[in-house]
Amino acid sequence: QVHLVESGGGLVQAGGSLRLSCAASGRAFSTYGMGWFRQAPGKDREIVAAISWTGDSTWHADSVKGRFFISRDNAMNMVTLQMNSVNPEDAAVYYCAASRELFCHHNPGYDFWGQGTQVTVSS
């Protein structure tokens, strides 16, 4: 069981940057693949980025590739999403999730979810 708490959301100007964090508690965090998802009003939840249990492998959706970067610190039980060059289409609730798979960039496939953090983009 992993408990996830996101932070760092808020209002950002278009073109700006934001850093989302996800603090994990529970056993064996380092054995879970981790991911960030987002859901905008009226849209399905979509996966944004994923990282393997060691942090050696990452995957980013085409829509954020080159702008968003996922990373993890297993010693701190933390996963982050660095968001750069944010645009209005990035506005959504962002969720951190943990997968029992060592590296997972699809859904279903995730087993534990945080409560989400809102990202609002002003143009």
Image (cartoon, rainbow, N blue to C red):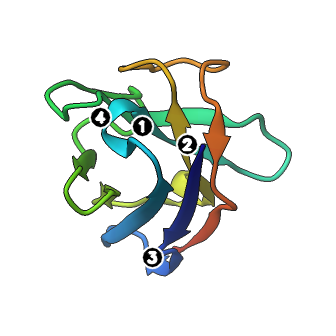
The residue that label 2 is drawn on is 97
Task: Categorize mark 4 by other alpha carbons within 10 Å: few (<14), some (14-19), many (20+).
Answer: few
Label 1 amino acid? Answer: Met
Label 2 amino acid? Answer: Ala
* Label 3 vs label 4, nearer the camera: 3
Question: Residue 57 location, x and y as percent?
Answer: 20, 24
Report, in whole angstroms, how far the alpha carbon at label 1 lies from the one at label 4.
17 Å
The residue that label 1 is drawn on is 34
Report, in whole angstroms, how far the alpha carbon at label 4 lies from the one at label 2.
19 Å
Report, in whole angstroms, how far the alpha carbon at label 2 lies from the one at label 3.
16 Å
Which image quadrant for residue 29? top left
* Label 1 vs label 3, nearer the camera: 1
* Label 1 vs label 4, nearer the camera: 1
The residue that label 3 is drawn on is 8
- The reply, left or right, for residue 105 in relation to residue 116 is left
| Nearer-N-terminus badge (3/4) | 3
Question: Residue 39 location, x and y as percent?
Answer: 69, 47
| Nearer-N-terminus badge (1/4) | 1
In this rendering, is residue 104 above or below 11? above
- For the N terminus, the quadrant is top right
Q: What element carries label 4?
A: loop
